[in-house]
Amino acid sequence: MRHLTSFSRLLPALGLVLLLLPGCYSRSDIKTEEGAAKEAPTDVAPTEVPGAVPVRTPEPAVAAAATAQPLQAVNVFLEVSGSMEGFMPKTGASGENTKFQQHVAQFLSEVNRTSAARQKTFYRIKERPYKDSYQGISTTVRSGIQQPAKSTDIPSVLDTLMSNYYQPGSVSVLISDFIYSPKNAGAIPYIKTDITDALTRSGSRPEMAVSVYGYTSDFRGTYYPALVASGKKTNCCDTEIPYYIWVVGPADAVRKFDQSLLEQQPSKQAHFGVTYPQPNYSLLSKFQNKGSWYYGDAGASKRNAESYRVVAVSEASAQQPVEFVVGMDLTTLPGQYRDLAYLKQNLKLQGVDTDAKLLDVTAATSQTKASSGPESKFTHFAKVRLTTPPKAARPLVLKLQDQRPTWVAQWTTKNDATPAPRTFALSSLLDGLEARSGAEKKSIFELPLTLQPGE
């Protein structure tokens, strides 16, 4: 979030000092405005945001029953500081618009119309959030920012979202360039800590998750680098500039929103703390298999070949290896985890007392989709080879590890003085999200199998 002038740049450090600075907002700001911050219909003039809503954690049974229900609320926040003007230039005589305007206008329309959420509310992020109508915020995107804010501050924004909008079944959606502008280079090492602190200051919420979606757009306006010393650039730019949509809320709500409104459009992705149901999977005995093995599941001959999990190996050797394929239906996962390059790098096979190895991961083709066999039901395939038959039943697990996608490093820069499709300190921002999610990363999924001797 770049600033209009060097005077208006805020210190990135959080705490009481930050909360007292002018041009920034916090939970205390909102509390002082509670008397005038009542909920208003979305078709009236903008008002200050309402006060905090108590948070309660649903019982497991309630959470399970709610998975098929619409979200309770979606709160969309659009940053309208000076650094965002280039994404939303005022309409000229030619009527040209930017990729940002086309994309975000369509996204806002989809949010406004979706049946995936019961309540949709829109806000402009200036020095603090202001409630707006769908028509008002859509007009801002299409026609340009009329009165841009002097400054916004990422930690304060996140603190406000967590303190006032975080509740079961709801998500906050923040649209911004996410430029964190420390006053001096000495503050840069603390960006990760500031983000983590902002997400935890209002209390511990172990179920919290954040999805990050990255895009680029042409940019027509004044470009403000993150560091003051770099100086602003006018009549910019000859290259596209990144912007982001962050979805913040309980893990189940973030997953629902992602799947309903963001998975259909191309984007870069990174997910923190979001959990997913186990994909459907099965052994496929008649698809690219080799060697002497068969389904070892009880009653296998009487079932459809869609959920076989036991490999019974009759013979195996280096000269005559066994190869089998596991079909996986990954349609319920976001694009990041369906990407073939990501799967090839991060899908691992773990076994006990076996030389089984993961040979390859492939995606469904037009041929497999049109097949009359069970392979038509799966989006991806994992091929496994072993040369030593098991001496007894042994566990085997296909596990997808959760790793930082490579695009984050490619989009990160330590110096954004020269406009480019990179974001200042992006990796550090996401480090803060990752730290909030916990030191130990959980697997995206684990698909257990069993190896056993054949008869």
Image (tube, rainbow, N blue to C red):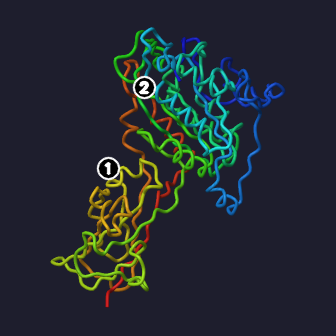
Q: Quadrant of the C terminus?
A: bottom left
Indicate which disc, 2 or 1, sits on the residue closer to the N terminus. Answer: 2
Relative depth, front residue between 27 and 65: 65
Which mark, residue 162?
none
Q: CA distance from mark 2 to mark 1?
A: 27 Å
- The residue under the point 37% across, 18% down is 418
Which mark, residue 341?
1
The answer to whether residue 425 is above or below residue 368 is above
Q: Position of residue 367 (x, y in %)?
A: 27, 59
Q: Where, by quadrant of the figure, is residue 123 drawn?
A: top right
Q: Nearer the viewer, mark 2 or mark 1?
A: 2
Tell me the SS state at disc 1.
helix
| Name of the residue lying farthest toward the bottom | 455
- CB contact under 8 Å: marks 2 and 1: no
Q: Position of residue 385 (x, y in %)?
A: 26, 71
The amino acid type, in three-letter code, at marker 2 is: Lys
Q: Does residue 376 appear to the left or right of 201 in the view shown?
A: left
Which mark, residue 99?
2
Q: Does residue 282 appear to the left or right of 101 in the view shown?
A: left
Tell me the SS state at disc 2.
helix
